[in-house]
Image: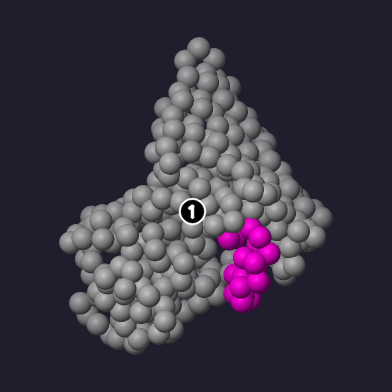
Amino acid sequence: MRVAIIGLGMASGPHAQSFLDLNPRAQVAAAYSPTQARREAFAERWGLPVTAKINGIFDDPTIDAVLILTPPNSHLELVQRAAAAGKHVLLEKPLDVSLDRSVALVDAAEQAGVKLGIVLQHRFRPISVALARVIAEGRLGELVGASAKLFNWRPQSYYDQPGRGTKERDGGGVLLTQGIHTLDLLISVAGLPVEAFAYATTTPVHCMETEDLVAGTVRFANGALGTVGATTCAYPGLPDMIELIGTKGTARIEGTRLIAEFHDGTNIVMDDGEVGGGAGADPMAFSYLHHRAVLQDFVSAVEDDREPQVSGREALKVHRLIEALLKSANSGCREAV
């Protein structure tokens, strides 16, 4: 599979390493950035071909797919161009800056009959796969509680970068940029909540347009309750957490560890090892292995003519939850998801 990369910002590193691992099954046909310095640095670091002409990517019939790593507010138009050219798309989260644009993006891919995979790599962690298996096997029984917490740290210098944390470029703050991973993982094991209530604020820790602290509650279709916490104010950055309470036991993910304890006296303790990170000042301080798993799944989805594990339609679920949380924070009312 010949894939073109569009966007060579800080997110490009884990993907480039993943392509090197998967070569020749997946190869980089060209990597595009409008910035010459970024093209030169990428080519020198990874030894992969670069281009200054984005139109050539969409016009080249030998390119099967595109990996889009550009700012969120550019995603809809780029996916529409790729879909019109008949190219499959692997897209960095989030889908786009608003729910309406995200829905239009997913519709464009589906109507063109191209595969659309979303880089929500937390689902591919071994501990996440193990937790999903625990749920599928019914070992927790019926879920009565399901919560998520993401306590990251980002210094002010992070938000001083042009466009970062703005509604225009990023679409939002901690929920859409950082919390989306943990919330998506929660949804993947517990299902999509049906109702949300939240508070959101911009604290004195940061000077930025959008929210850096959110505290909320959610209710699921079966009556289960949960809490949602997300911030980039928690120095120096704490492990993310998923907590599930069932009628037969409890399970939680704390950073790289899964701990499940059941009423029958059995338990599961599992550690991914040194593959977590990203909670502190360096958002790229993590292993690329989960990105590689996303790329492997995407390539297989195209080869086998199936949907990627995290398709565009699947990723819309976490966007709907984030939309409900922020809408509740603005209205002061409970909001349907």
Image location of residue 244, percent across then percent down: 58, 32
Tell me which residue sits at (46%, 71%) in the image: 9
Say if residue 107 shows up in the picture: no
Of residues 5 and 116, the one drawn nearer to the viewer in this rendering: 5
Does any portion of residue 287 appear in the rendered image? yes
Percent position of residue 202, x then y: 76, 61
The residue that appears at 53% across and 40% down in the rendered structure is: 255
Q: Position of residue 12 (x, y in %)?
A: 40, 66
Extreme top residue here?
265
Assess whether residue 124 is covered by the magenta stretch.
no
Q: Is residue 86 above or below residue 211?
A: below
Specify the quadrant of the image occupied by residue 134.
top left
Assign a secondary structure to mark 1.
Answer: loop
Residue that label 1 marks: 285
Q: Position of residue 82 (x, y in %)?
A: 36, 76
**Residue 158 within the magenta-colored segment of the rendering:** yes
Residue positioned 36% across, 62% down in the render: 15
Label 1: few (<14), some or many (≥20) within 10 Å?
few
Horizontal side of residue 329 vs 139, given as left or right = right
Amino acid under disc 1:
Ala
- Which quadrant would the N terminus be assigned to in this image? bottom left
Tell me: 10 left or right of 41: right
By secondary structure, the bulk of the magenta-drawn segment is best described as loop
Give the mark count. 1
Relative horizontal placement of residue 262, taking residue 49 as reference (left or right): right
Q: In the depicted view, which residue is nearer to us: 236 or 223?
A: 236
Residues drawn in magenta: 154-177
Report which quarter residue 2 is drawn in: bottom left
Q: Residue shown at 55%/47% (left/top)?
A: 182
Please say if 11 is above or below 32: above
Residue extending furthest left? 24
